Amino acid sequence: MMRPLPCAGFFDPAYYQSQLSAPVPDALAHFRAEGDRLGLDPSPYFSTRFYKQQHPDWATRGKPTALDDYLAQDVGPVWLRPHPMIDPDFYLQRYPDVAASGMSPGGHFARHGDAEGRSPSGEFDAVFYRRCYLRLEETGAFAHFMGGGKAAGHLPKPAPRSAVQSAKAMADTALALNNPILLAAHDAQEAGVPLLLLDLARDLAKRGFSPIFVLQDGGPLVTPLRRIGTVFVLAEGWHAAGLCSGVPAGVPVIVSSAVAAPMAEASARAGLRTLLLVHEMRGYLEAQGLIPALVDAQRAGARLIASFPRMAEALEQDLGPLPVVRPGVVLPVTPLDEFRLRRRSRLGRHMFIGAGHADRRKGFDLFLAAAHEIATQLPQARFVWLGALDPWARQLAGQAQASGLPLTLPGFVAQPLGWYGAASVYLLTSREDAGPTTLIHAAATGTPFVGYAADIGLQGIADPLGRFVASGDQPGFVAAALDFARSDTPRARHNRRALLRPHLGLARYCDELLSALA
């Protein structure tokens, strides 16, 4: 049987199978025999029905499917549209490098452009879609939209609402609730501050509050947040000041993260009692240009609260003395079977673990450097990094694995305690870190940490749970990690768990925040 002309990206077996009521053994054969006739699409990048409507004479050219006809005809200089949301003229004008290459714009987008974050037309904004709906490590915004995002109600591009429309939507939402409270953050990615916001919302809901959420960007945590309350994502087109003006008087506001400081300023200017929780270290705030936004929010009437004493001390010159409320920590629920599975997977070898969104700030390169040295001295050791990797870190990880380093990369793990419990040592290699909460998760399973004494929020607080060594002292770091791995005892692990236990949970944290709002 003939196969379509070769063009990567235009036939995706998994995508095709998703349109069928039952799986078939040969997706391509099924498409050629039945799928094309039924109007099914071979991939996210080709719409069979659309192409046939645009080219009703396609069958007269003797090709067995509309896809075959497209691949045969799309040779320029007039480029064909394979999909209603892929516009060749737009694509070539937006991306001169593609125009200069002479490649088919549709073919380029299917093979490369979607993965590179390019937009196929004015009807689909890839940057917007990634901000609102993808995980940190995900690419292929258009394929995501066609593969389920559209059906889930995701927008292909922003839908701007006026201040009046935004105010009405917020007022309608809040007035229908008992005891509403507005919670805001920069995004809903599976990372420290958004996860804390989710835990905080759950605790407040148990206390009788009805949370409403305002996020600058979206992310995968939007789904669990929506189980608790209505979510407004500013990037989708909502007007921030308009939303705040629609909040009824007396409704309290908690803005979590300095990145969302403009939201705190807007709510304070609307006369709402506003807390702005500063979770970031000064170095990060300076690098991102966020200190002026904190000053503006404070001047507007928002009350700023630092998460750790080191943050408050570093910001005093700009913001004056700040109260400190140390965040609570809720341990992720992890089934006992997960602990057993991870312990069995160790196979008697020492495991060293790191965690977080792997980038330069998290010191992923320092983690790999330490791992290579540890592996030299402890050949049976293995290494795990929990969390998404940015492109820089992904390249470093690939090089490390190619060199033979036994590195496992599970990505974000919703139930990580089994991994931490199976680890010999948690390696904290951050150059700057507001916490991290992952260190507490590791210590809650008894696992000690070794960290560089960099700009770390928990330094001076978490010291009894492990050991800090001087920044840049890789030999000292490696020696400390090996010492824990070789000499740590069950009693020592038990003592760490016992030391941490009184500090777990959100009750105290919630109490202090609500008192600050009173």
Image: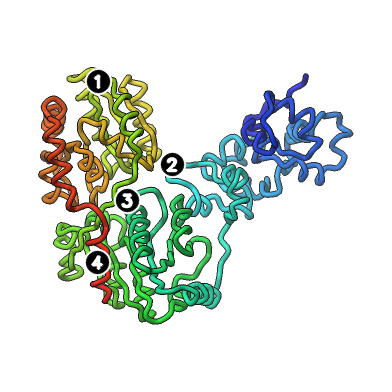
**In front of the other: label 2 or label 4?**
4
The alpha-carbon separation of the residues under discs 4 and 3 comes to 20 Å
Of the residues tagged 3 and 2, which is closer to the observer?
Answer: 3
- Find the distance from the CA under tag 1 to the CA under tag 3: 31 Å
> Which structural element holds mark 3?
helix
Q: Whole-percent x and y of residue 200?
A: 33, 60
Judged by depth in the image, the label closer to the viewer, 1 or 3, is 1
Above or below residue 515? Residue 498 is: above
Q: Which amino acid lies under the numbered mark 1 shown in the image of this protein? A: Gly
* Viewer-proximal residue among 472 and 192: 192
Position above or below: 132 against 4: below
Query: In what element is the residue under mark 1?
Result: loop
The residue lying at 34 percent from left, 76 percent from top is 268
Instruction: Answer yes or no: is residue 73 visible.
Output: no
Residue underneath mark 2: 137
Of callouts 4 and 1, which one flags the residue occurring earlier in the amino acid sequence?
1
Which residue in the protein does label 1 denote? 348
- In the shown orientation, is residue 326 left or right of residue 495? right
Identify residue type, mark 2: Glu
Query: Tag 3 or tag 1, which sits nearer the N-term?
Result: 3
Q: Which residue is mark 4?
A: 511
Q: Which quarter of the image is occupied by the C terminus? A: bottom left
10 Å crowding of disc 3: few (<14), some (14-19), many (20+): some
Pointer 4 or 3: first along the chain? 3
Q: Earlier in the sequence, mark 2 or mark 1?
A: 2
Alpha-carbon distance for marks 4 and 1?
44 Å
